[in-house]
Image (cartoon, rainbow, N blue to C red):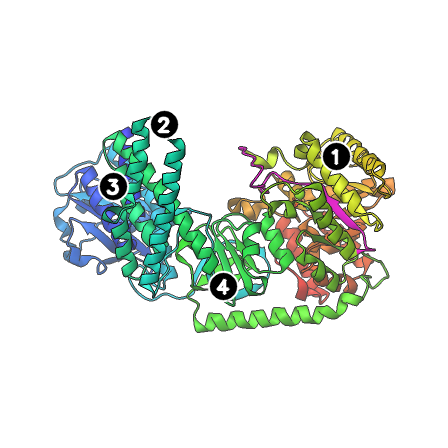
């Protein structure tokens, strides 16, 4: 068992390090044949364009047949394995009715056959086969080995295939265009631009390829990075001299030797001389050495692989530092990363950033919410994207459908350029609405507020005619720092917001970290972060953070008096009691300091099912309720808002969500207190019609969508909206809700601003 795992690990590692798909497949067939002690091992891959399985690599059959022999999807034993999606194990293959003979391969001599399908994300990618001359019934163990190998290799093959495709090469070496990678919509709109891959710091595995012209300069850069690491190591060794034993200190000498020209240095320089930039040259040399050490039998030597990785990371950190200073961003920049963070958004000059692509996360992740606020087309959760190899490539980002295209053809580019133009015309057409009030045709007034967090939001929000701020996400200024901001610093930041919108009201939410919002300087590590220490739970456990923040808000509002405070993630009345207690304490402290401010209105966010059922009690305790539909949807439907695998189950128009909202609205109406909605749902024009009909008093949304919502609400009557609400509340299926709603609005001639939300 252990042996099998070791073998698997070794083969997968080797295959992962392969340069391209053909060499990856060659390694697979060689290793599998060796390990299973058979005469033949081959891989056939399915080409969806031709609908045929093509022999792509073999060890044992005639190699001249590679790329030549192919079978239709219903032909031969290969087609049989693919269609059954199961292993086929035959002692006498020629006797099977599906056997098909190919003279080119010399296959007739092989009696026994074991074939397993290679399946990735439900898609049959090909078939892995072993064969033998003598009749042999392959054992259950053989079958298990081949199935396990194939399952592991499917992802690797898919990755290798995608890597070729983004360079414009199909796996047969043919030119391919318009290669599509599927993700989920993050922020609407489309963009065409050049990929800039941004990496987590010092992660060798994710360094992209990049071609350089000036070999001398690149080698010099590498020399300087090595020198810097050497100085670091010497200092470290000096510092530790009194604490470590001699043998342990000797390790530092080994490290220093590794950096020498005679060891890694020369190999890296050779790759640079071939036109590769220093970071990727280092990546390849380190990967090769690590693989060699990891394959060793001796456990001490195996461990040295870790040292090599470590030294590689240290050199890389210096190279990246130097790179950051020199980085020149293209005019139309599409930021691509494994996981885009809010801090990364700040690194690219705003006027150059046209699109975002993230391998992780989904449309409800916080970075997607920021992207929507900034109006940058975004695709999230593109899990199969070989992102580290994409730097500098031309990409199309379709944030409406959640798709990314590489190597766009002339026709595709033209199609998307037209869409960009249409989108621009639509938003220009809506600009003139900014001065007009949001009133329905039958005279119902619907206040539209904005959600903010970035300073850049302020100007955009005011331009678009926002009537207040329904949610200021205070964690955003906390996230771009490297320590907790002081009371004074917070006061200055909050004052800017309050002043910019004065006299309009600004609703500041107390710090809402945890879940997918981490502070680098206050790490929280949990198995289930969305069910863990989040929002109010953190700040009640840290009154020093809550009090300082509240004091900063109160002081910032002096003379302006437009502050409202809001509490996130409330799941019990006692949390509200405790929070109110702390707010009153902070209030009396600032009064004692001579600051003259009125007590601001305080509200509770309804984001957790428990709070829906206690809305009546909660609303008695505070001045308003505000529904956070992003979290409420995730908790009602038990769908992680951040997980692309379940993104199509996340549905804010789900009947359960709609009925919860109706319930909250009725609690507020009976208490005579206002209800607002500040989740992304409020910014979806079609959903906004329903929320207005339910009796929401405020809709708070991102500035980008505000004009669309206003346009739609100004075209419809409250009476029609209520009729629509009645109709959809009778439906039991989220897809039906969405399609009936969209159809009805289109029939009224209001289709142009609808968003195909999930
Ligand atoms: C929400 O959950 O709907 C909300 C507005 O808060 P956030 O998206 O910041 O969690
Ligand atoms: Mg929330």
143 vs 329, left or right, is left
Q: CA distance from mark 2 to mark 1?
A: 61 Å
Quadrant position of residue 628: top right
369 vs 319, left or right, is right
Residue 83 location (% of width, % of height): 34, 49
Q: Which residue is mark 4?
A: 329
Task: Name the mark nearer the viewer: 4 or 2.
Answer: 2
Whether residue 288 is visible: yes
Q: Which residues are magenta?
A: 502-527
Count the numbered circles shown. Answer: 4
Q: Quadrant of ligand 2?
A: top right
Q: Badges 4 and 2: C-beta atoms under 8 Å apart?
A: no
- The label on residue 292 is 3
In front here: 566 or 290? Answer: 290
Helix, strand, or loop for circle 1? helix
Task: Name the mark nearer the viewer: 4 or 3.
Answer: 4
Residue 386 location (% of width, % of height): 40, 54
Helix, strand, or loop for circle 4? loop
Q: Badges 4 and 1: C-beta atoms under 8 Å apart?
A: no
* Residue under the image location 16 percent in, 55 percent down: 63
306 vs 62, left or right, is right
Q: Which residue is mark 1?
A: 613
Q: CA distance from mark 4 to mark 1?
A: 51 Å
Mark 3 or 2, nearer chain start: 2
- The label on residue 244 is 2
Residue 314 location (% of width, % of height): 39, 44
């Amino acid at each position: 068992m252990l042996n099998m795992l070791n073998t698997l690990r070794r083969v997968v590692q080797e295959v992962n390090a392969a340069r391209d798909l053909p060499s990856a497949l060659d390694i697979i067939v060689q290793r599998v044949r060796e390990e299973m002690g058979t005469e033949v091992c081959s891989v056939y891959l399915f080409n969806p364009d031709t609908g045929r399985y093509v022999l792509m690599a073999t060890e044992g059959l005639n190699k001249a047949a590679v790329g030549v022999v192919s079978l239709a999807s219903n032909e031969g034993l290969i087609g049989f394995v693919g269609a059954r999606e199961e292993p086929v194990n035959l002692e006498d293959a020629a006797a099977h009715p599906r056997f098909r003979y190919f003279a080119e391969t010399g296959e007739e001599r092989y009696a026994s056959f074991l074939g397993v399908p290679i399946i990735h994300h439900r898609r049959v990618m090909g078939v892995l086969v072993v064969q033998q001359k003598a009749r042999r019934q392959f054992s259950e163990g053989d079958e298990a080995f081949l199935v396990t190998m194939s399952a592991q290799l499917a992802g690797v093959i898919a990755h290798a295939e995608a890597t070729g495709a983004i360079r414009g090469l199909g796996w047969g070496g043919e030119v391919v265009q318009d290669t599509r990678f599927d993700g989920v919509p993050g922020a609407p709109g489309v963009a065409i631009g050049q990929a800039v891959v941004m990496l987590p710091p010092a992660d060798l595995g994710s360094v992209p390829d990049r071609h350089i012209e000036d070999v001398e300069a690149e080698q010099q850069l590498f020399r300087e990075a090595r020198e810097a690491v050497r100085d670091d190591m010497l200092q470290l060794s000096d510092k530790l001299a009194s604490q470590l034993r001699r043998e342990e200190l000797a390790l530092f000498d080994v490290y220093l030797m590794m950096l020498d020209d005679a060891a890694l240095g020369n190999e890296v320089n050779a790759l640079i001389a071939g036109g590769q930039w220093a970071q990727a040259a280092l990546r390849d040399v380190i990967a090769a050495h690590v693989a060699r050490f990891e394959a060793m039998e001796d456990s001490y030597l195996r461990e040295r692989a870790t040292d090599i990785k470590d030294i590689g990371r240290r050199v890389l950190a210096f190279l990246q530092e130097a790179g950051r200073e020199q980085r020149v961003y293209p005019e139309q920049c599409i930021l691509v990363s494994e996981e885009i963070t809010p801090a990364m958004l700040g690194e690219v000059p705003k006027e150059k950033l046209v699109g975002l692509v993230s391998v992780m996360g989904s449309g409800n992740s916080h970075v997607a919410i920021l992207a929507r606020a900034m109006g940058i087309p975004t695709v999230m959760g593109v899990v199969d994207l070989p992102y580290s190899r994409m730097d500098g490539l031309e990409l199309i980002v379709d944030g409406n459908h959640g798709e990314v295209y590489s190597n766009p053809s002339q026709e595709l580019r033209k199609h998307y350029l037209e869409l960009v133009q249409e989108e621009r015309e639509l938003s220009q057409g809506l600009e003139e609405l900014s001065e007009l009030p949001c009133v329905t045709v039958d005279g119902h007034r619907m206040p539209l507020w904005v959600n903010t967090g970035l300073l850049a939001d302020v100007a955009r929000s005011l331009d678009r005619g926002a009537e207040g701020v329904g949610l200021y996400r205070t964690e955003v200024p906390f996230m771009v720092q490297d320590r907790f901001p002081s009371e004074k610093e917070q006061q200055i930041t909050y004052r800017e917001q309050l002043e910019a919108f004065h006299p309009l009201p600004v609703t500041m939410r107390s710090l809402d970290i945890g879940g997918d919002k981490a502070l680098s300087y206050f790490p929280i590590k949990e198995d289930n972060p969305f069910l863990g220490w989040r929002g109010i739970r953190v700040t009640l456990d840290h009154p020093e953070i809550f009090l300082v923040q509240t004091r900063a808000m109160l002081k910032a509002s002096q003379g302006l008096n437009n502050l409202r405070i809001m509490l996130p993630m409330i799941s019990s009345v006692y949390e509200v009691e405790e929070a109110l207690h702390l707010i009153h304490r902070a209030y009396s402290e600032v009064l004692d300091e001579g600051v003259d401010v009125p007590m601001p209105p305080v509200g509770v966010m309804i984001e957790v099912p428990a709070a829906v059922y206690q809305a009546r009690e909660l609303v008695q305790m505070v001045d308003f309720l505000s529904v956070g539909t992003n979290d409420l949807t995730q908790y009602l439907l038990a769908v992680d808002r951040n997980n692309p695998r379940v993104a199509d189950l996340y549905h804010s128009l789900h009947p359960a969500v709609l009925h919860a909202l109706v319930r909250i609205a009725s609690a507020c109406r009976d208490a005579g207190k206002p209800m607002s909605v500040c989740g992304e749902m409020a910014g979806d024009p079609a959903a906004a019609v329903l929320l207005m009909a339910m009796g929401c008093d405020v809709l708070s949304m991102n500035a980008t969508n505000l004009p669309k919502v206003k346009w739609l609400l100004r075209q419809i009557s409250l009476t029609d909206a209520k009729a629509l609400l009645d109709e959809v509340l009778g439906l039991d299926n989220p897809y039906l809700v969405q399609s009936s709603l969209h159809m009805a609005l289109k029939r009224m001639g209001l289709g142009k601003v609808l968003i195909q939300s999930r």
